[in-house]
Each structure stands twice: as structure tokens, then as C-alpha cells.
Image (spheres, helix red, strand yellow):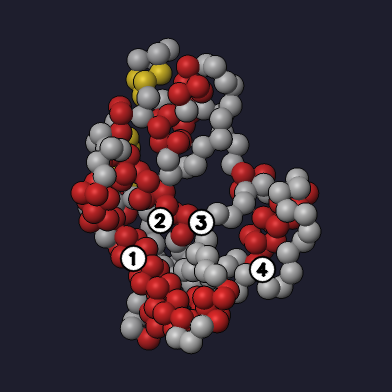
Amino acid sequence: MTLLLSGDVDAAAAMTYNEYAQVLEAVNKATGKTYSAADLNQIDFNQEGTAMLEDGIFANAEWLAKSGNEDLAVKFIAASLKGWIYCRDNMADCVKTVLDQGPTLGEGHQTWQMNEVNKLIWPNKLGIGLMDPAAFQQTADISLKYKVITKAPDKDAYRTDLAEKAIKLLTDAKVDVNGAAFQPAVVTLSEGGKTATVAMPSMAATMAATP
């Protein structure tokens, strides 16, 4: 983003939860204020049909084949998903946990990141952690077209049975794996990402209902 902000490049790829925020935290020399979405020409890969999946959970097939390891994998997946669910419902607490471990990026930036990642996950019709077949196929097609892979993946390219078992563990424990009622907060960044103004949806609803 440094090259984009300095004008050395005309366009740059950015994640909505990270690099995009870095731009919004920078001061626009033309206005003396931080950048806003209106200052930028944005191309959404999801709308263009060029978005690709990332950040999966991977395991060695030989390891999974050993006795007891599939059960261990299911518990690991369930614990990981439960963590993301907790961060959906307790955004500020998760931001604090991250800052306690690494304060390099400011509280404002991390709050933006948590909110944007939640928006990518929720609501989730399939259930968190389950592969979206259409998204996988789009990723595979693009990868094959541009020779990232040399042949189309077969039916064994991914599996969902372990995630399904993990989701069952969570649903049996009355954990909401779909987040149908999720509404994101509105996060307004400050210069440098040190702080942010956060308007939670419940607060907005309360204010709207007040005469």
C-alpha cells in the first residue's frame, strides 16, 4: 500500500480486512484528511467472478489414517470453529487478545480486521467450516486456466466429513454455527489505525427506536 499511496503504482491488490484499512488510515495529501471509500476506485473480485478461496485447514492423509487421529482432527476443527464463533459474538474481547500477543497494529486496525473477517464468515448458510462447492469450483477453474495447477482436481481434492462431525459437536452443545442473526458493526478508522469508532448494530437499533 505504500507504493499505491505514494503514486508509484496505479493499482494494488488489497484484502478488505487489512491492506484496504491501511489506505483508509492514511492521510490524503489533497484533502488533509484520511482517505474514504469515495476517494478510491474499487474492484470487488467477488462481483467480478475472480475471487479465490484461501486459509483452509490442511492435514496429512497418512496422519489422518492412523488410529484415533480423525477424532483428534474433529476436536481440533470444532475448537477452531468455536473460537471464530466466539469472536463473532465477542469482537472487543478477541481484539484485546490479539493486542495482548502482538500490539504492532493498533487497536483501531485490529477492530476493523475483526469486523471485516466476521463479515466474510457470517451469516453462513452451510455452517462455518464447510466448503462451499461453488467457491471451490471457481477457485479450481481459475487455478487451472492460469496454470497454477496442471489438471482439474478430482472428487478427493477436499473432504467435509470431519468438519460435519465438528459442527455436530457444536450444535449438540447448542452453539450457533450459522450466525443467521449476525449484523456487522460500523467501524470508522483514525489516522494510523491507533483507534476506531465502533457503532454496534444493537446500539444503532436502540437509537433508531428512541423518539
Residue indicated by mark 2: 118
The answer to which of marks 1 and 4 sits earlier in the sequence is: 1
Mark 1 and 3 residues: CB-CB less than 8 Å, in contact?
Answer: no
Residue at 52% across / 69% down in the picture? Answer: 59
Cα–Cα span, label 2 and label 4: 26 Å
Is 143 placed left or right of 88 in the picture? right
Q: Which mark is residue 55?
A: 3
Cα–Cα span, label 1 and label 3: 15 Å
SS at circle 3: loop
Three-letter amino acid code at disc 2? Asn
The answer to which of marks 3 and 4 sits earlier in the sequence is: 3
Cα–Cα span, label 1 and label 4: 26 Å
SS at circle 2: helix
Residue at 76% across / 48% down in the picture? Answer: 147
Mark 1 and 2 residues: CB-CB less than 8 Å, in contact?
Answer: no
Q: Is residue 111 visible?
A: yes
- Mark 1 surroundings: few (<14), some (14-19) or many (≥20) residues within 10 A: few
Total marks drawn?
A: 4
Is 126 placed left or right of 92 in the picture? right
Give coordinates of residue 20: x percent, y percent. 46, 35
Cα–Cα span, label 3 and label 2: 14 Å
Residue indicated by mark 1: 83
Residue indicated by mark 4: 157
SS at circle 4: loop
Residue at 55% across / 54% down in the picture? Answer: 54
